Image (cartoon, rainbow, N blue to C red):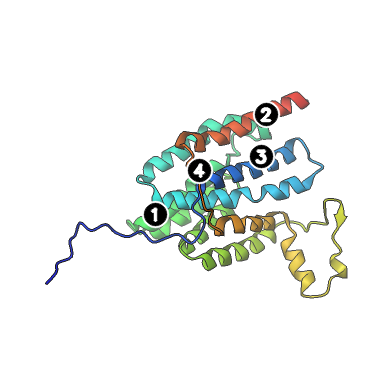
Amino acid sequence: MTLVSEQQPVLRRALGGNTATGILKIIALVFMMIDHSGKMLFPSVPEMRYLGRLAFPIYVWCMIVGFEYTRSVPKYLLRLLAVGLASQPLYMAALNHRWNEPNIFLTLFLGLCALWGIREKKYGSQIWAPVLAILLSGILKADYGWKGVLFMLLLYPVRYSRSGIASVMIAYFLFWGCFYSLTPSLFGWEIPYNAMPEPVQGIMKALNRSEAYGLLSMPLILIPFRKDWKMPLWLSYAIYPAHLAVLWLLETVVK
């Protein structure tokens, strides 16, 4: 009789989405820079803000991948907290925010705390951790608020399924879009909603809302890249405050 050794390595289940997070983070940074530049430098070009909606879901997916493979969740949380605190002054200077309007790292921090509680299941943490994270995101005025944390909580359980990821993203961004006004035009072209037959009109009205444009990130999240660039850990965290510093300098020059 053959005995199974207790020392055999546990095979890790493959994630259903793109795990090339080095390249994904650079792509997300580009979209985030477009978004913030549109807000501060080109307010008359709303299309820049629409393109910027791709950044958040990409960063959320990268965080879920990181959570899946990290050796130490507490260290991961400390890095998010440290970068968030260090970036806040630049966030305020570059984007005209106040101290009580925290940057995106608080949202990621709360979301990661919730996912950790769900995975560890200590003292019922799979219940109270996500509930507390959602409540705190509202109380602390986290960027994207409770809807941003909820997106992480919905995406995490389907991380191994490509069809599951797609389903959550489609359903959630259509839901999220309902909170925002309809986009009347794109690149100077007025969208003729009333001339469209049903159900095309209803679909177009659901998709053409600012937050619904986050759906455009779905191919980047789902389709694996053949190669990845292993970004140094320090650089992956430095690019967020760095882009805020660059934006602040550009604003200073323009003014």
Residue 181 — which label? none
Cα distance in 3D space between marks 1 and 4: 30 Å
Residue drawn at point x = 83 percent, y = 57 percent? 184
The kind of residue on which mark 3 rests is Met
Residue 15 in sight? yes
Mark 2 in CB contact with mark 3 (< 8 angstroms): no
Please state which of the two labelled residues, at mark 2 or mark 4, is closer to the viewer: 4
The residue lying furthest to the left in this view is 1
Cα distance in 3D space between marks 1 and 2: 37 Å
Mark 2 burial class by Cα count in 10 Å: few <14, some 14-19, many 20+: many
Q: How many marks?
A: 4
Instruction: Name the residue beneath numbered marker 2.
Output: 248
Cα distance in 3D space between marks 2 and 4: 28 Å
Q: Secondary structure at mark 3?
A: helix
Instruction: Name the residue beneath numbered marker 1.
Output: 117
Instruction: Name the residue beneath numbered marker 3.
Output: 33
* Rendering quarter of residue 180: bottom right
Q: Secondary structure at mark 1?
A: helix
Tell which circle, 1 or 4, labels the residue nearer the N-terminal end.
Answer: 1
The location of residue 55, given as percent across then percent down, is 62, 48
